[in-house]
Image (tube, coloured by chain):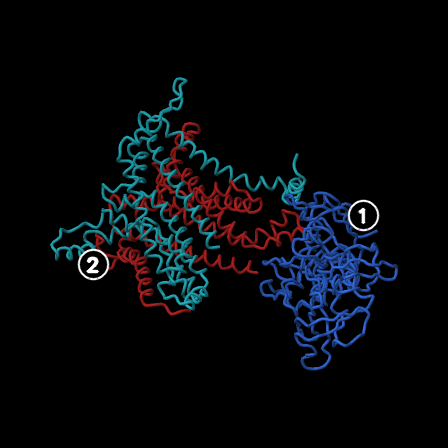
């Protein structure tokens, strides 16, 4: 049985459906991320699971039991808030001890558990400090320790890394992965940062306007986006309007007006004559001098612009019909890899099984 | 039939904040204020329509089964111009006080706002500390200063004597009343002005200077408009209390310097014509409510323009 | 900081002088060996001695303190409840109710309470105006101040702290007792102190609701000013100023702590 199940969950604010008939099933021990732009409903779902909001329709089942009538303090799950929500008038140790006090544990038990929890986040030496004396990352870790100290069934994290700078965020991401693995508690993580979602999760639920667009492992979300929104939201993509010329079990032939034909991997539901989009990732697109004839899907164009970010350079190439396509080139040679300049004639190509066809 | 979302909100509210808790917390203050603020105000309204009692106070509301109500007090108020005149005079005093307060408070507030941050708190405290003393003491102080034997009066009179003018009494005059009003209410103007000016972004003035504005233009085009909300708050905090003041004219003013407050006090404690006193109070209340509404409207307009 | 022009400094200094000189004169003349507040004759403590022998003044002082203690206690309790209720339940009627008595000219509240006590309490309950009527009147206008202070403190707090407490297993009552109340305590104390000072200081409302038998310090001062001015008034004024100064220092200490504990 799944640990947490959302069935037809709906929450409306006036005429707007913040959460629109969402169903989701989460297994014990998973690290699941709700990913989406602001306003897509991910935080609302989290708050309903925590008990700070009630659904208008649908059910929330924990271990098979509906918890809609259970007040937040009685639910066996905890939340790590975006602002950490540490009690400013209590020390770090008192903060971490709080849930144990609420559960009426004995004093010696509380002492031991608090120490264990703080040691696991490397903050035992700051046990008697007050929250305002800590840095953002330290507050983050105290909040984590506090929520995990009494081993809840489920941990909800509401954009906990949003306020941290890039380096710290990366460190915390590693810590979170390790923590979740060591402790084995199910995490439900909310974020709008797709790189975070891809790095941390076992499964990602990509959300848009109250609905789940795709719920899958990160590699499948990235490599096989279900629709245009997911393809666009995750990573960089080049998109082309296409029409299916031929649909076979092993391949698709897509006609691009003004350019010719593309060979693409097969897609369920694709039929000849169907209109749609072809999406391909920059790292799948090779770029080379105009004479090169390497891969099957091969087009000529001019370099319109490029962005150098240290390890790679992304070139935007304008094809014959004006369509822009992004191609990634790794900068393996030292120094700036100025292989191509703006205005150069180049050829771009990709494998016949690269990219995806997306329905309209 | 309630829409689903309203129902969910209600259920969420009742589970998060128990209905019982809601009433336990809000009822005591609400009952107290209803009893000792709203009820007296309503009684005041009704009292303005009643007859005065034989020995002062109010005549019975129901006499021999008849309601004893009348518009006599209102007729009386509008019959003699003198009452409206006192209202107008009070308005004038309030306006003058407010303007003078703005004039005196602005430089001080500005200076404090532009001082180093660590000094600002102390400077504000110093500016507001006099307010902590009893208001009668502050009025009494001016009795001393403006008294006929005091240095100030003698200096002024000898100066006037040089030019051949009659000696003036500074005390028990409209001048003294004005000085007292300004002195007592100055901190109410300083605080909101300072709070507003302290929030001004110095980068705005730098930008204006960078674009070619001189000092006066910078003040008039940048600082002054941005400080208007502070001026409005301060003005409301000064104007309204001054309108209702009676102690200052009572102590520092002469017999002809009565304002609305004095008139009301007379009705209730002197002549004991309570219905008329109630009418005067009602008039004052309406004026104050009108002003407060005006201030709120101005503040909203200001927010929209400067936001 | 930018250099400030001389004019600005001069104007500001003049303003500070204007604020303080009158009070300094009052204090100075409380030690003046002359019945008239005209010119300095010599140093004396006679007026203070006379003050402490003035039974009317002492009774008035005692009354003021009793009234202030009672009124500030009740006003703090009611005002804190009001502040909590307004913040948590987003009430719109209660703030108006609490703050209007503060915003209106004092004379209106004084007069309407005089009317109310006379028309209702005297005939129905047989009560004459006295200490109780003053206390009730003071509570009425002090509630608004406490409400504002408590509510301001709540507005500055991160809401998720209270949700976190519930999330971690605390019932609503436990959340209030262990989290909310300790955090608003500085504001509550500040409100209490302010109510105490306001009540001690009040003249206008007390003037109308005290009736015949009760005198408070401000009322005594007023009658002295109107009837027979002696530097005894200066002496009591000086002492009152010292007392208020002491309370302000105390209040600012507490408020300083309030800022520390809720800073993010």
Q: Which residue is mark 2?
A: C41
Q: Is residue A7 at least partly visible in the picture?
A: yes
Q: Which of these two is toward me, B56 or B274? A: B274
Q: Is residue A159 toward the left or the right of residue C57 in the image?
A: right
Residue appearing at x 63%, y 49% in the figure: C174
Q: From the viewer's perspective, is the residue at label 2 or at label 1 nearer?
A: 1
- Image disc number at residue A64: 1
Residue A106 horizontal/vertical position (percent)? 71, 56
Residue appearing at x 30%, y 56% in the figure: C23
Residue A317 horizontal/vertical position (percent)? 70, 70
In the rendered image of this protein, does residue C145 appear above or below residue A287? above
Q: Which chain is red?
A: C
Residue appearing at x 65%, y 68% in the figure: A166
Q: Which chain is cyan?
A: B
Q: Of all residues shown, which one is farthest toward the bottom?
A: A334
The alpha-carbon separation of the residues under discs 2 and 1 comes to 93 Å
Q: Is residue A150 at least partly visible in the picture?
A: no
Tag count in the figure? 2
Badge 1: chain ID: A
Q: Of all residues shown, which one is farthest toward the right?
A: A249
Q: Which of these two is toward me, C75 or A175? A: A175
Q: Is residue B48 toward the left or the right of residue A240 in the image?
A: left
In the rendered image of this protein, does residue B151 appear above or below residue A326? above
Q: Tell me the element at label 1.
A: loop
Q: Which of these two is toward me, C47 or A51? A: A51
Could you classify mark 2 by the number of other residues whose Cα lies within 10 Å: few (under 14), some (14-19), or many (20 or more)? Answer: some
Q: Of all residues shown, which one is farthest toward the front?
A: A258
Q: Which chain is blue?
A: A
């Amino acid at each position: 049985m799944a640990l947490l199940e959302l069935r037809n969950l709906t929450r409306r604010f006036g005429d707007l459906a913040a959460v629109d008939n969402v169903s989701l099933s989460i297994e014990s021990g998973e690290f699941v991320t709700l990913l989406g732009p602001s306003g897509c409903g991910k935080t609302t779902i989290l708050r309903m699971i925590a008990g700070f909001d009630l659904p208008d329709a649908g059910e929330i089942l924990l271990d098979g039991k509906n918890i809609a009538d259970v007040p937040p303090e009685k639910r066996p799950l905890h939340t790590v808030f975006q602002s950490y929500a540490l009690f400013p008038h209590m020390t770090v140790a008192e903060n971490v001890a709080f849930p144990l006090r609420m559960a009426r544990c004995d004093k010696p038990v509380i002492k031991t558990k608090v120490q264990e929890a703080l040691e696991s986040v490397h903050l035992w030496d700051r046990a008697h400090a007050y929250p305002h004396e800590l840095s953002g990352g330290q507050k983050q870790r105290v909040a984590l320790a506090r929520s995990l100290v009494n081993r809840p069934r489920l941990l909800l994290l509401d954009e906990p890394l949003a306020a941290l700078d890039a380096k710290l965020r990366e460190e915390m991401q590693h810590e979170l992965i390790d923590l979740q693995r060591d402790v084995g508690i199910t995490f439900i993580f909310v974020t709008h940062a797709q790189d975070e979602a891809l790095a941390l999760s076992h499964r990602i639920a990509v959300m848009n306007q109250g609905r789940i667009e795709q719920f899958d492992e990160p590699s499948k979300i990235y490599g096989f986006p279900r629709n245009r929104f997911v393809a666009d939201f995750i990573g960089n993509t080049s998109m082309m309007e296409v029409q299916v010329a031929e649909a076979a079990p092993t391949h698709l032939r897509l006609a691009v007006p003004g350019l010719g034909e593309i060979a693409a991997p097969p897609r369920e539901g694709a039929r000849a004559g169907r209109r749609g989009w072809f999406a391909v990732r920059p790292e799948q697109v090779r770029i080379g001098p105009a004479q090169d004839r390497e891969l099957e899907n091969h087009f000529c164009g001019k370099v319109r612009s490029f962005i150098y970010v240290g390890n790679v350079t992304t070139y935007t190439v304008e094809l014959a019909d004006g369509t822009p396509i992004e191609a990634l080139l790794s900068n393996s040679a030292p120094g700036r890899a100025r292989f191509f300049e703006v205005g150069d004639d180049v050829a771009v190509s990709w494998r016949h099984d690269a990219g995806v066809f997306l329905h309209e | 039939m309630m829409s689903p979302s309203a129902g969910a909100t209600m259920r969420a509210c009742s589970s998060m904040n128990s209905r019982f808790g809601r009433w336990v917390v809000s009822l005591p203050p609400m009952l107290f204020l209803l009893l000792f603020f709203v009820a007296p105000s309503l009684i005041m309204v009704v009292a303005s329509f009643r007859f005065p009692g034989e020995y002062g106070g109010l005549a019975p509301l129901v006499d021999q089964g008849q309601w004893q109500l009348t518009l006599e007090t209102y007729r009386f108020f509008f019959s003699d111009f003198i009452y409206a005149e006192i209202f107008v005079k009070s308005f004038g005093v309030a306006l003058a006080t407010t303007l003078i307060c703005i004039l005196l408070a602005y430089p001080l507030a500005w200076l404090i706002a532009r001082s180093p941050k660590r000094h600002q708190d102390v400077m504000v405290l110093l500016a507001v500390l006099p307010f902590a003393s009893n208001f009668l003491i502050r009025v009494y102080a001016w009795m001393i200063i403006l008294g006929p034997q005091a240095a100030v009066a003698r200096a002024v009179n000898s100066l006037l004597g040089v030019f051949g003018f009659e000696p003036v009494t500074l005390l028990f005059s409209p001048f003294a009343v004005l000085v007292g009003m300004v002195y007592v209410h100055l901190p109410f103007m300083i605080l909101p002005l300072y709070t507003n000016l302290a929030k001004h972004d110095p980068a705005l003035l730098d930008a204006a200077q960078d674009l070619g504005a001189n000092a006066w233009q910078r003040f008039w085009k940048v600082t002054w408009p941005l400080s208007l909300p502070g001026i409005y708050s301060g003005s409301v905090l000064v104007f309204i209390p001054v309108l209702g003041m009676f102690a200052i004219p009572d102590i520092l003013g002469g017999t002809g310097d009565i304002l609305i407050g004095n008139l009301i006090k007379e009705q209730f404690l002197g002549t004991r014509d309570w219905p008329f006193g109630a009418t005067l109070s009602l008039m004052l209340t309406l004026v104050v409510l009108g002003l407060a509404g005006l201030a709120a409207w101005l503040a909203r307009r200001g927010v929209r323009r400067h936001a | 900081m930018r250099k400030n022009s001389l004019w600005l400094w001069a104007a500001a200094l003049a303003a500070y002088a204007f604020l303080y000189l009158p009070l300094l004169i009052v204090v100075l003349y409380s030690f003046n060996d002359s019945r008239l507040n005209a010119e300095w004759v010599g140093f004396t403590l006679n007026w203070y001695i006379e003050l402490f022998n003035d039974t009317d003044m002492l009774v008035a002082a005692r009354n003021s303190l009793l009234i202030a203690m009672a009124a500030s206690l009740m006003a703090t309790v009611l005002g804190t409840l009001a502040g909590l209720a307004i913040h948590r339940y987003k009430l719109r009627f209660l703030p108006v109710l609490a703050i209007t008595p503060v915003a209106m000219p004092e004379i209106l509240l004084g007069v309407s309470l005089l009317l109310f006590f006379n028309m209702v309490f005297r005939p129905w309950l047989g009560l004459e105006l006295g200490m109780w009527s003053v206390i009730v009147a003071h509570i009425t206008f002090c509630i608004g101040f406490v409400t504002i202070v408590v509510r301001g403190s709540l507005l500055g707090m991160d809401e998720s702290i209270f949700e976190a407490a519930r999330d971690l297993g605390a019932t609503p009552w436990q959340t209030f007792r262990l989290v909310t109340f300790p955090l608003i305590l500085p504001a509550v104390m500040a409100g209490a102190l302010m109510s105490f000072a306001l009540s001690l200081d009040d003249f206008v409302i007390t003037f109308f609701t005290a009736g015949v038998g009760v005198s408070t310090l401000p009322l005594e001062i007023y009658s002295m000013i109107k009837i027979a001015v002696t530097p005894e008034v200066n002496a009591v004024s000086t002492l009152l100023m010292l007392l208020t100064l002491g309370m302000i220092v105390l209040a600012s200490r507490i408020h300083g702590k309030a800022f520390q504990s809720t800073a993010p």
